[in-house]
Image: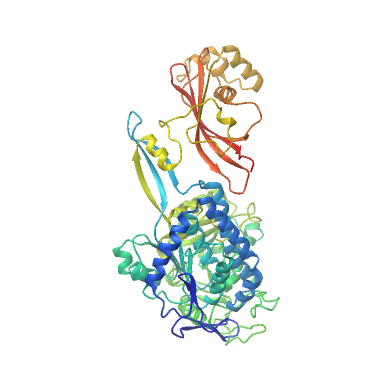
């Protein structure tokens, strides 16, 4: 590793013109490199992302971007051992490193999967259904999402130097927005190596990822209305950045994930000897020691029924007493160092406020026994457990960002909900209980103050990912003190990097713009049945009209006997007559759908491989004996699969009676083969 790290900007690695700030090995205290961005033209960096990276990404479809994320995840997975080894110099144990490295790679893979399964094959994402704006159906509205023509600037915290950049990169990349990565100084060397691996892979379009090995300098001065900033760090820094004059004047999108006084609540039912009591003690100990407690999702306030406080403290102390602190290279070590001595000193300052407010029941803030390391040169700290009066303000205002938690008593459900809210907004909270009523009351009471809530009991414990593990499928963020932002959350995170636009127009125009057939636009019927066409031959609007078929009383009675569905509306004339919706016996809705399939299906072997579902089925008009049914089936959306020899076709199905009234509408989902190459 070079003494001063280079930044990857404008298509190449650029060394700074100054020595910069030092980075230290968290275990030994030795200097291992420096970070600086002096001499880098920040305006040109942002412009390169917008002019080179953005257009290259927008040329790709959602599915193509997803494929690149999948390939990148595979590439980084091959280099995990190297990243683990370097991660140890941040103070992380192997388990901590896997949480960071594998977790980040997992986010890439999750977004790759969601991109293929949940996003269209094109470049426009539809948001919601068509909105009718006129009686005649000639004037409609549709919300669409398109990628912003800017850059996503990510400012990361020191505690997750791999997961942080990757969880921000994945949704931005999938949306089609280039990223500028800025790491935190203490662990920037690990992020730098991660970016080196990304660049060396050659997988991502030029300009889609840039890296600043140090300060952002005057980058914020050059941001525009199309850019975004995603910040992870302290609440005070988030407030400072949020009020930057350029961000305010140009309404630059800003999302923050800040420090958080997360809580975990033990239910009154979870007494000593219950599975939930043991789960609570284990979770609290884990959250105190994983990453040496340097997690924005760690448990800082452990709310326990007053009569259980002593039992919980005793059980947690027993587990903490078995935790070996020291050099992560020693296989016996279960908790490594903090990211640096500056971070350790900051935790000790925060602990002073907490110890003044309560009392320490485990650990010594100033001394710790360590294995294979110097406790002063390395950034080591003992796990510290406190207790005190739950009404004391410091417990709800001061976060010691390390292996620190406080056990606090509560006496009622209403009180513990109020105590949880005194954190002024949290990323996550957990409720450990086997009582569904208690869980419901606490979740609904605490939810307005939390971004995520975990309900843990013996039923889900085996598969639970735990209190402190954000999942890419779910939002990560929280209100108030936690920053007021959201990251990930599946496709929600992608949409954050896009502009939602309401488009109004005729059915024909909306079909052309969205690439999805809209009812009222043109249909194309030919002598060739659409089911005889391969995927490449099909066009939006291709249609088959089949029928009519008369529905008889004998049909209905046969269907009832054959299926066992003898519901009175189909079989009992007197009861059906009394039904305000029917007035007489009617056909089964599923008989109507079955008859429709019999009308539109081309039975001979051909390109259609399978029908894999029906969406949005609605029965609109009762079908009576003697009604004649006609089916109009129209190709609505065509989605090729890049990695398969078939694609998905969504068909609009409209079943009508002789009067032209729709009796059933739904979407038919099929798999259609591509032409043999």
Q: Residue at x 44, y 78 (%)?
A: 37
- Which one is nearer the viewer's eye here, 536 or 672? 536
Q: How many numbered callouts?
A: 0
Residue 94, given in percent of the width and then of the height, sits at 65, 72
Residue at the front extreme, as displayed: 677
Q: Is residue 197 above or below residue 532?
A: below
Residue at the left extreme, as displayed: 249
Q: How is the image coloured?
A: rainbow
Q: Is residue 167 above or below residue 2?
A: above
Q: Is residue 548 above or below residue 248?
A: above
Q: Is residue 420 above or below residue 31?
A: above
Report whether residue 483 is seen: no
- Which one is nearer the viewer's eye here, 574 or 95? 95
Residue 449, given in percent of the width and then of the height, sits at 43, 58
Residue 403, given in percent of the width and then of the height, sits at 56, 74
Which quadrant is home to the N terminus?
A: bottom right
Which quadrant is home to the C terminus?
A: top right
Report whether residue 426 is seen: yes
Residue 631, given in percent of the width and then of the height, sits at 51, 23
Q: Quadrant of residue 248?
A: bottom left
Quick check: 448 left or right of 467?
A: left
């Amino acid at each position: 590793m070079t003494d001063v790290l280079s930044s990857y900007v404008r298509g190449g690695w650029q060394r700074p013109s100054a020595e910069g700030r030092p980075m230290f090995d968290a275990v030994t205290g030795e200097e291992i490199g420096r970070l600086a961005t002096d001499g880098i033209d920040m305006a040109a960096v942002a412009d390169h992302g917008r002019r080179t990276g953005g257009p290259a990404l927008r040329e790709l479809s959602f599915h193509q971007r997803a494929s690149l994320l999948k390939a990148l995840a595979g590439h980084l997975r091959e280099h995990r051992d190297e990243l683990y080894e370097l991660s140890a110099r941040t103070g992380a144990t192997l388990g901590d490193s896997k949480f960071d490295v594998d977790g980040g790679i997992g986010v890439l893979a999750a977004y790759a999967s969601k991109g293929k399964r949940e996003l269209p094959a094109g470049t426009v994402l539809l948001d919601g259904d068509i909105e009718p704006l006129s009686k005649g159906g000639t004037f409609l509205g549709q919300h669409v999402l398109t990628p912003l023509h800017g850059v996503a600037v990510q400012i990361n915290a020191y505690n997750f130097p791999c997961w942080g950049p990757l969880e921000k990169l994945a949704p931005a990349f999938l949306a089609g927005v280039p990223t500028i990565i800025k790491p935190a100084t203490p662990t920037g060397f690990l992020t730098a190596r991660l970016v080196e691996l990304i660049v060396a892979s050659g997988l991502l379009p030029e300009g889609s990822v840039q890296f600043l090995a140090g300060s952002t300098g005057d980058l914020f001065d050059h941001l525009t209305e199309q850019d975004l900033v995603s910040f992870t760090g302290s609440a005070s820094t988030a407030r400072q950045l949020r009020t930057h004059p350029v961000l305010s004047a140009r309404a630059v999108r800003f999302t923050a994930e800040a420090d958080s006084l997360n809580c975990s609540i033990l239910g009154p039912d979870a007494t000593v000897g219950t599975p939930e009591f043991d789960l609570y003690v284990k979770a609290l100990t884990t959250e105190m020691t994983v990453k040496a407690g340097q997690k924005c999702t760690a448990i800082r306030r452990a709310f326990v029924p007053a009569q259980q406080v002593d039992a919980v403290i005793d059980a947690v102390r027993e587990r903490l007493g078995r935790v070996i602190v020291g050099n992560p290279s020693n296989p016996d070590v279960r908790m490594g160092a903090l990211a640096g001595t500056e971070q350790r000193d900051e935790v000790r300052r925060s602990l002073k406020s907490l110890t003044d407010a309560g009392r320490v029941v485990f650990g010594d803030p100033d001394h710790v026994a360590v294995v294979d390391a110097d406790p002063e040169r390395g950034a080591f700290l003992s796990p510290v457990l406190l207790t005190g009066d739950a009404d004391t303000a410091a417990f709800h205002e001061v976060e010691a960002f390390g292996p620190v938690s406080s056990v606090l008593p509560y006496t009622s459900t209403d009180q513990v909900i109020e105590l949880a809210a005194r954190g002024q907004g949290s990323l996550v909270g957990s409720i450990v209980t086997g009582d569904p009523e208690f869980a419901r009351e606490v979740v609904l009471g605490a939810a307005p103050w939390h971004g995520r809530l975990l309900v843990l009991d013996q039923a889900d414990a085996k598969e639970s990912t735990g209190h402190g593990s954000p999942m890419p499928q779910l939002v990560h963020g929280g209100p108030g003190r936690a920053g007021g932002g959201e990251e990930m959350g599946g496709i929600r995170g992608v949409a954050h990097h896009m502009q939602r636009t309401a488009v109004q127009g005729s059915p024909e125009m909306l079909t052309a713009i969205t690439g999805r057939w809209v009812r009222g636009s043109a249909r194309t019927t030919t002598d060739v049945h659409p089911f005889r066409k391969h995927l490449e031959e099909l066009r939006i609007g291709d249609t088959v009209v089949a029928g009519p078929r008369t529905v008889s009383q004998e049909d209905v009675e046969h269907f009832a006997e054959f299926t066992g569905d003898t519901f009175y509306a189909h079989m009992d004339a007197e009861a059906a007559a009394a039904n305000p919706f029917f007035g007489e016996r009617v056909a089964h809705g599923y008989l109507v759908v079955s008859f429709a399939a019999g009308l539109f299906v081309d039975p001979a072997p051909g390109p259609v491989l399978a029908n894999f579902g029906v969406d949005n089925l609605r029965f609109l008009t009762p079908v009576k004996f003697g009604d004649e049914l006609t089916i109009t089936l129209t190709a609505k959306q065509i989605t090729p699969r890049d990695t398969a020899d078939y694609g998905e076709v969504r068909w609009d199905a409209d079943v009508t009676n002789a009067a032209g009234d729709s009796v059933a509408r739904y979407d038919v989902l099929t798999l259609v083969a591509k032409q043999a190459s």
